[in-house]
Amino acid sequence: MFITYKENKRIKFGLILLEISFIIVALISIFKHGNSTLLGSLESFDNDDVKYIRSAWNLVGSGIFSYEDISKSTVYIMPGLTFILSFFVIIFGKFQAIVAFRIFQVFLQICSLNLIFLIGKRVFNEKAALIACTIDSIYIVEIYSANLILMEVTFKFLILLLIYLSIRALETKKTKYYVLAGIVWSLGCLFKPTIAVYPVVIFVVWIKARYKMKEMVKYASIVVIIFCIIMSPWWVRNYNNFNMFIPFTKSSGNPFLQGTFINYNQDKGWGVEYRRSEDSIQNDEYEVEEGIERLKIYGKEETFKFAYWYTIGKTFYFWYEPFYWTQYIGIKNLLAFIEHYFILITAIISIRNFVKEKNFTLGKQVMALSIITMNVVYLPYFTCSRYAYPLMPLMIIFSGNYVYHKMCKYRDSKIKKRQGV
């Protein structure tokens, strides 16, 4: 699926060299910095990463899928990351599992690098694809994220694989690609519910490509059946534990409530009745109600501010900084910001050029619509660079194409000068 005999030898050599270099740097980083890259403490369990680790330990030790309170079953998070960590805990033990998982993430990063090449080659060409891989391999955030115990690396890989399979499915109309895409999409939902909106992207492309209704119903039915098969164990488990149908998560209303504060500034207080319960699901209902109440009150009082905040404002927070929250791996924040903005600016110019030239092929549509759709789905909630990170490879592919065309123009101008044209 990845590098094939069809690639130009120099392109293949370049990609292999990038992969080897990335592996060496990433592994050095992992063994040098160890648990200093944890965002929380393994003693107080005060951040997402250490809570996921504890969740895996508890699942293996007691069989309870938990998160905040290890004595209670939870539906606060999706089970994907806990299950993967649990696998490593069973094989390597509690603490060695953390190292093993980081090494596993390096492997996933290499798989993602190959997917960037495959998507870039299919949508543009192999030289633009190799440039995109080069940009991705030196993007500091990729090394940093491999050190973290979060689901972003796995989720990014699943998004890239889903997009590659989607492009193949749309171009060939082969059922096998829709089946594979349906499996990957469903697995992605076990990590982040936000990916559940992805079929909107495919539906829009279907309409633009003038798919027949019969074809759309056929492929959609296949994917829905796969989705139900993969998600049903989670649904049954939730019903048995909580006596209600919970398709994804519950007790996760807080990001919605946080999102109602402009610039996330809570200095003036909540401004609505504060209610709390010992039951986490009840708390979710309270938080959603409080968030809606805040929108009713302050949305009317400051309509323009809230309209701006729920569009441009949250989009800014989604993209404005790289997902590089610490400097534990020894690289300054400034360099990460320079790389990040180079990618964003060149990618946006590249997308604008395609729109201007009306040169939007199926692959470009899938990539651009995926970026837009995932951006929009986060707007009702708390947004930050962590959530934008899985989409950065798509921006990088567009950026790689921009750089490729600039290099071609520079080469052509040099040739013309030598020829005296």
Image: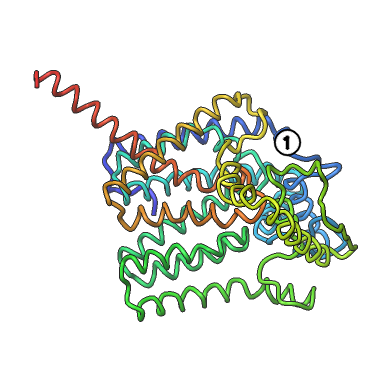
Query: Which residue occupies 77% across, 55% down?
Result: 55
Query: Which residue occupies 46% across, 55% down?
Result: 370
Left or right relative to 353: residue 245: right
**Residue 323, placed above or below residue 184:** above
Which residue is more in the foreground, 97 or 154?
154
Q: Quadrant of the C terminus?
A: top left
The figure's colour scheme reads rainbow
Q: In which quarter of the view is residue 257 placed? A: bottom right
Residue placed furthest toward the right = 278
Residue bearing the label numbered 1 = 35
Horizontal and vertical percent position of residue 92: 71, 49
Horizontal and vertical percent position of residue 160: 47, 52
Query: Which residue occupies 66% across, 74% down?
Result: 233
Looking at the rendered structure, the kind of residue marked 1 is: Asn
Which residue is more in the foreground, 163 or 310?
310
**Residue 341, placed above or below residue 239:** above
Mark 1 lies on a secondary structure that is: helix
Q: Residues within 10 Å of mark 1 (few under 14, many from 20)?
A: some
Left or right relative to 107: residue 62: right
Which residue is more in the foreground, 276 or 24?
276
Horizontal and vertical percent position of residue 46: 81, 44
How many numbered markers are drawn?
Answer: 1
Q: Quadrant of the N terminus?
A: bottom left
Residue placed furthest toward the left = 420
**Residue 264, placed above or below residue 62:** above
Query: Which residue occupies 57% across, 76% down?
Result: 229
Q: In which quarter of the view is residue 194 placed? A: bottom right
